[in-house]
Amino acid sequence: MANNKALGTGGRKSDKDLKIRVKTAKGRKVASTKWLERQLNDPYVARARAEGYRSRAAFKIKEMNEKHKFFKRGNRVVDLGAAPGGWSQVAAAAVGSTDANPLVVGIDYLDMDPIPGVILFKKDFTEDDAPAMLIEALGGHKADVVMSDMAWPTTGHRATDHLRIVHLIEIAADFAIQVLNPGGSFVAKVFQGGTEHELLHMLKRHFTSTFHVKPPSSRKDSAEAYLVAKGFKAAPSVRDADEADRD
Ligand SMILES: C[S@@+](CC[C@H](N)C(=O)[O-])C[C@H]1O[C@@H](n2cnc3c(N)ncnc32)[C@H](O)[C@@H]1O
């Protein structure tokens, strides 16, 4: 049960005094209690609720866009790992997407409530037919921004978790390279240690600039980080170089 400390009348209370503490309850694991306490004391959770965002993650893409300005009015956007929908909400507002003219397409294997101006698919992006479904939903147009906040639940086995995350980033990057318009942007969750050397090397060839970003709303104690790649180059010579790399 939430145990909100009573405020006295004298003087200003410190943040420590104002912190909501959650008592451990029978049947609730210590980790769940800590998670609940963190949620209740997280200013971004409160802001997300107040501003009508589905998740506190909405602030991460907002902050990255404020810095790197990848969303423009009329852009087409693909959101990989979209649930519960914070990034799609931010993107739809930034590009001016509406139900009459939807410009944002999202995918997640979890259920999602509809979002105005966003076409949503409930599907695993690693399935073979997922990229084609997203491309079709773009109505034959290329995308201007591909963003991926995808992450698997961790197994606790470091090497396995690392490989699974790297795989998700790679397929998201391959997809971005197929569908982006020249000048487009790719934003992806990459985790600490940055992007794998080979992948970063490949992205540097395809984009004019790449950045590793830790948005202020990303929890300090989390290994999460993001890659922002801007200025997609569609030059065939870049594709040739990739093919040569694979030989
Ligand atoms: C951190 S959450 C995304 C939060 C979202 N950006 C927002 O603002 O609400 C990561 C999401 O990636 C999804 N995901 C992970 N792997 C996926 C996959 N292979 N295909 C589709 N979705 C995936 C998870 O189901 C989860 O909902």
Image: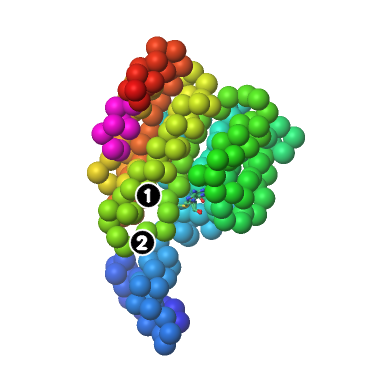
In the displayed structure, would residue 163 be above or below residue 132?
Answer: below
Helix, strand or loop for disc 1: helix
For the residues labelled 1 and 2, the Cα–Cα distance comes to: 10 Å
Q: In the rendered structure, does residue 60 fall within the stretch colored magenta?
A: no
Helix, strand or loop for disc 2: loop
Name the residue at the front extreme: 247
What residue is pinned by disc 1? Answer: 164
Q: In the rendered structure, does residue 201 fall within the stretch colored magenta?
A: yes
What residue is pinned by disc 2? Answer: 155
Residue 87 is situated, as x and y percent measured from the top left of the image, at 52, 44
**Res. 80 mark:** none
Query: Is the magenta region chiefly helix, strand or loop?
Result: helix
Q: Quadrant of the C terminus?
A: top left
Q: Nearer the viewer, residue 133 or 208?
A: 133
Q: Amino acid at mark 2?
A: Thr
Give the residues in magenta.
195-202
Residue sitting at x 46%, y 16%: 234
Residue sitting at x 27%, y 53%: 159
Name the residue at the right extreme: 100
Q: Amino acid at mark 1?
A: Arg
From the viewer's perspective, tell me whether residue 117 is left or right of residue 42.
Answer: right
From the viewer's perspective, tell me whether residue 162 is left or right of residue 138.
Answer: left
* Mark 1 nearby-residue class (10 Å; few <14, some 14–19, many ≥20): some
Residue sitting at x 43%, y 85%: 27
Residue 239 is situated, as x and y percent measured from the top left of the image, at 42, 18
Q: Are marks 1 and 2 in contact (CB under 8 Å)?
A: yes
Residue 172 sits in which quadrant? top left
